[in-house]
Image: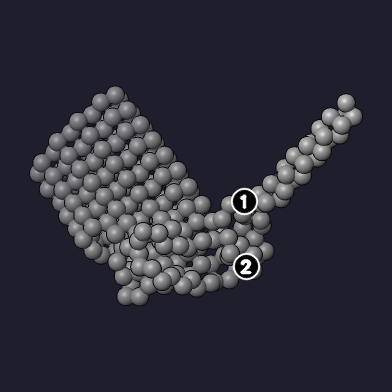
């Protein structure tokens, strides 16, 4: 009986120690207020950028590739910038971090074909991005603000996230769901296909044609009357001119 009790106490003590260690590793780190900018060397090429973990990303199209991270000195090493399968993934190591300044990543790159923002992160373009094709994706309260002059644009927003696009394009394929928004009334586009669902909203500016499908309390607004319009709405959704 004494041996059993002794073993139980040992197991309890070990479990308590493990719990304490886990809490130690997951404690919150507060920024020390000393803001520094660190250049990151990336050997692999990338044409896509993915932002995570509430990090703010500023993208500029330029001849050379450069990456710089601006953050509190004691948080710098927690921010990761790695290329996987042609995608620059920006994230943070496990743990909780707080800073009055926030964490910013500045990127210049010659060709940009995809921008993805997740988990309350944000991506903003510093200049007008040019090219043939680009995909914009947001989820989980993230945001993308982009100035574009691109032939073909795909935009997908979900889970209370937002995409704001300005500029010009030949074709736009937009999809929004789960209370998300795509604001593209200042994007002049020849041909637009848009689909909304679950309380989401999309506003567009079609010139030649608009194909719109809205369902489940969602809304599509168009800020010009194109030559051709095809509209399908159901379950309390609406498709209306603004």
Give residue 158's position: percent from left, percent from top: 38, 41
Badge 1 crowding class, 10 Å Cα cut-off, few under 14, some 14 to 19, many 20 or more, is: few
Give residue 32's position: percent from left, percent from top: 67, 64
What's the residue at 45%, 43% (across, down)?
140
Q: How many marks?
A: 2
Q: Can residue 169 be seen by looking at this rendering?
A: no
Position above or below: 238 against 47: above
What's the residue at 56%, 55% (across, down)?
93
Position above or below: 139 against 6: below
The front one of 67 and 72 is: 67
The front one of 157 and 236 is: 157
Q: Please identify the quarter of the rendering in which residue 180 is found.
A: top left
Give residue 184's position: percent from left, percent from top: 29, 49
Which residue extends farthest right?
A: 2
What's the residue at 33%, 72% (across, down)?
62
Secondary structure of the residue carrying numbered label 2: loop
Q: Which mark is residue 73?
A: 2
- In the image, is 83 to the left or to the right of 226? right
What's the residue at 35%, 37% (across, down)?
177
- Closer to the N terminus: mark 2 or mark 1? 2
The front one of 126 and 76 is: 76
Position above or below: 69 against 97: below
Which residue extends farthest top?
A: 235
Secondary structure of the residue carrying numbered label 1: strand
- In the image, is 220 to the left or to the right of 199? left
Give residue 58's position: percent from left, percent from top: 42, 63
Q: Can residue 150 be seen by looking at this rendering?
A: yes
Residue denoted by label 1: 96
Name the quadrant of the C terminus: top left
The front one of 26 and 134 is: 26
Q: Which mark is residue 32?
A: none
């Amino acid at each position: 009986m004494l041996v059993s009790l002794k073993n139980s106490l040992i197991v309890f003590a070990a479990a308590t120690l493990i719990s304490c260690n886990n809490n130690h590793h997951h404690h919150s780190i507060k920024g020390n207020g000393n803001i520094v900018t660190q250049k990151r060397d990336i050997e692999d090429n990338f044409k896509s950028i993915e932002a995570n973990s509430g990090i703010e990303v500023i993208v500029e199209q330029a001849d050379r590739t450069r990456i710089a991270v601006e953050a509190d000195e004691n948080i710098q090493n927690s921010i990761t910038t790695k290329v996987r399968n042609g995608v620059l993934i920006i994230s943070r190591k496990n743990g909780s971090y707080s800073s009055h300044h926030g964490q910013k990543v500045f990127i210049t790159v010659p060709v940009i074909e995809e921008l993805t923002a997740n988990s309350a992160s944000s991506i903003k373009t510093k200049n007008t991005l040019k090219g043939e094709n680009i995909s914009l994706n947001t989820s989980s309260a993230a945001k993308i603000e982009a100035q574009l002059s691109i032939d073909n644009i795909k935009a997908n927003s979900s889970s209370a996230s937002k995409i704001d696009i300005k500029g010009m394009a030949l074709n736009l394929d937009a999809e929004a769901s789960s209370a998300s928004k795509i604001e593209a009334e200042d994007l002049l586009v020849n041909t637009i296909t848009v689909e909304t669902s679950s309380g989401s909203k999309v506003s567009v500016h079609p010139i030649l044609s608009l194909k719109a499908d809205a369902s489940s309390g969602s809304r599509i607004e168009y800020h010009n009357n194109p030559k051709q319009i095809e509209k399908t709405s159901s379950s309390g959704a609406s498709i209306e001119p603004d």
